[in-house]
Amino acid sequence: MRRPPWRLVLLCVACGFCSLLYAITHSSSGNTEAQEPATASLVWRRGAPDRKHRCKDFSVSFWNPYWMLPTGVCGKDCFWEATFRYSLLKKHELDLGPMHLAVVACGDRLEETVTMLKSAVLFSIKPLTFHIFAEDQLHNDFSTILNSWGFPERFKYTIYPISFPSENAAEWRKLFKPCASQRLFLPLILKDVDSLLYVDTDILFLRPVDDIWSFLSEFNSTQIAAMAPEHEEPRIGWYNRFARHPFYGKTGINSGVMLMNMTRIRRKHFKNDMTTVRLHWGEILMPLLKKYKLNITWGDQDLLNIIFSHNPESLYVFPCQWNYRPDHCIYGSNCNEAEDGIFILHGNRGVYHDNKQPAFRAVYEALRNFSFGDDIIHSLLHPLELELQKTEHTYCGRIHKLFTKRLTKSIDDFSTRQLNVR
């Protein structure tokens, strides 16, 4: 049957409009990285750090149309997504509010913490606000070092004393490592902070903090925090083989990098295995410690595993390259996502300071020795590449190119921003 001519005309107009919109959106975003101003947020790179993989996780259907997809999925390639989101994303692109980062430092962790903070400042785009919880004897040293960096427009900081609830302070202080459980009380102490990235002192950022911060925009309505799995390979997992308490998922979660919507944490009533009554964050911690203190090995991390095992809908799990540890390469590579590069390096078990994992130590020493104002390629990247070549006798050293793959991109972006500033 012959179709009416007006239908063909309407179809041609619709196809032409789609093609025009596709071309406009691509041309507006195609040169972002080459031409970005110093203060611009790289919304397409930052909002969807692993876009080519994330698109595979979602299918478009009647129940999951284009305009319902999470931010970052399919980017501007989707017609309806481009139509309904473009103005919202442009607004987000201009959001220059500070990112909040917290760390807890005790004992001999001053140098390690300063190196972590340096890596955060070096590559990040939006300004940072540091919340540093430290023993009293470290306060002056932190202030002296951070003030010497000399660019207050890039970051601000506040130093806090170590503090626990007075009635159980001694018990919390001795849990696992000194001061480690301080992180559990951040939502209760930093009451005016909406969202926060907590990291251990032995963290190194190999790409902008902005990129992991963007995961906050991907939280659904029930998610309050984001962490990476403790292990990718169950055969070498600790929790699934040895834990004597509940833990999240198949292999547990690692709390060395923890992104939190603290407003949601403070509001939430948590399910638990102690009472049928749901409890607030401040109400659940001590009862959990009393119940499981004889069964937990990793202290506060175990308590977080217990909490999220009963509230799995509250956790957003990000891939292992955002919390890459020696366990991911010590017996051979078992973090598949790291093939795109390591984004955040976590040198737990003291590997920055011994010879057990020389690849990790090489990255740490390269960033520790780098000074702001030095040529970043000749003073950081090239010396690091030479040192990593000497580590090929280890499993982690054999894949040393993964340690610099994303770092090289971050340095290129940093150099571009510096040129644009000039």
Image (cartoon, rainbow, N blue to C red):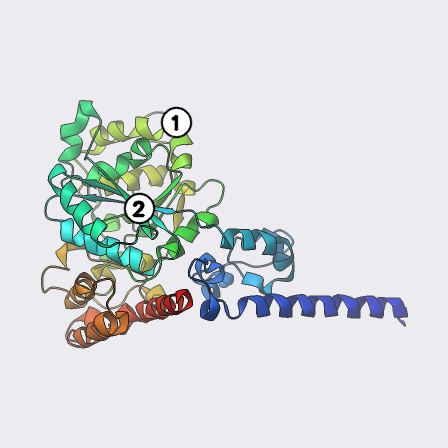
Do the CB atoms of the residues marked 2 and 1 lie less than 8 Å apart?
A: no
Q: Comparing marks 2 and 1, which lies closer to the viewer?
A: 2
Which x, y percent locates residue 396? 21, 69
Q: Is residue 265 above or below residue 226?
A: above
Which x, y percent locates residue 394? 16, 71
Which x, y percent locates residue 81? 61, 57
Q: CA distance from mark 2 to mark 1?
A: 37 Å
Residue linked to disc 1: 278
Q: Quadrant of residue 381?
A: bottom left
The residue at the point 50 percent across, 58 percent down is 72
The residue at the point 43 percent across, 63 percent down is 50
Labelled disc at residue 371: none
Q: Is residue 307 above or below residue 226?
A: above
The residue at the point 29 percent across, 55 percent down is 120
Q: Amino acid at mark 1?
A: Arg
Tell me, yes or no, if residue 337 can be seen here.
yes
Foreground of the two, 75 or 24:
24
Foreground of the two, 66 or 26:
26
The answer to whether residue 344 is left or right of residue 290 is: right
Residue linked to disc 2: 156
Q: Amino acid at mark 2?
A: Lys
Of the image marks 2 and 1, the number of the one nearer the N terminus: 2
Q: Quadrant of the C terminus?
A: bottom left
- What secondary structure is marked by label 2? strand
Tell me, yes or no, if residue 64 can be seen here.
no
